[in-house]
Image: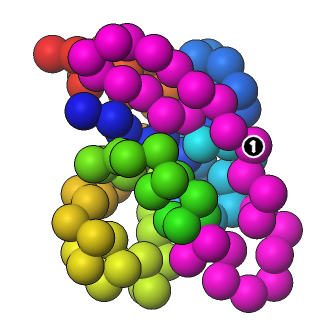
Amino acid sequence: MRVAIASTGNTLDARICEHFGRCDYFIIYDTESKAIEYIPNPYKYDDYDAGIKSVELVTTRNISKIISGEFGLKIKPMLDKLKIQLIVVKDHNKKISNIIELLNQ
């Protein structure tokens, strides 16, 4: 399974980002191969539809889940239509490494 995680940086010590479309990086994690890909978010400063453009970007990586602190109102219907699970992590101090550990359990 491939998972996109909204991150504040491009390391495993970075934290989960509070806002999906405004995150600095998307971390794509493959739970089977344990491969990690860091993708800079080119839409984080866009004035309009940063979340939708971000979904379009990460779905090119064949993901089945997206994890973030929060999602915009337009994102849930889009993810439902794409059959991608949305996971909200309220603890914004969680490191990416902690989230990956939970995915591996």
- Residue at x 54%, y 67% (from the top left corner): 56
- Residue at x 31%, y 84% (from the top left corner): 77
Using residue 23 as the reference point, say whether residue 78 is left or right of it: left
Q: Crowdedness of circle 1 by 10 Å Cα count: few (<14), some, many (20+)?
A: some
Tell me the colour scheme of the image. Answer: rainbow
Identify residue for label 1. Answer: 40
Secondary structure of the residue carrying tag 1 is strand
Using residue 19 as the reference point, say whether residue 30 is left or right of it: left
- Residue at x 73%, y 52% (from the top left corner): 41
Question: Can residue 69 be seen at all in this image of the molecule?
Answer: no
Q: Nearer the viewer, residue 8 or 55?
A: 55
Quarter holding residue 98: top left
Residue 87: where, in percent of width, then height? 29, 53
Q: How many marks?
A: 1
Question: Can residue 58 be seen at all in this image of the molecule?
Answer: yes
35 over 62 or under it: above or below: above
Range of residues picked out in magenta: 27-53
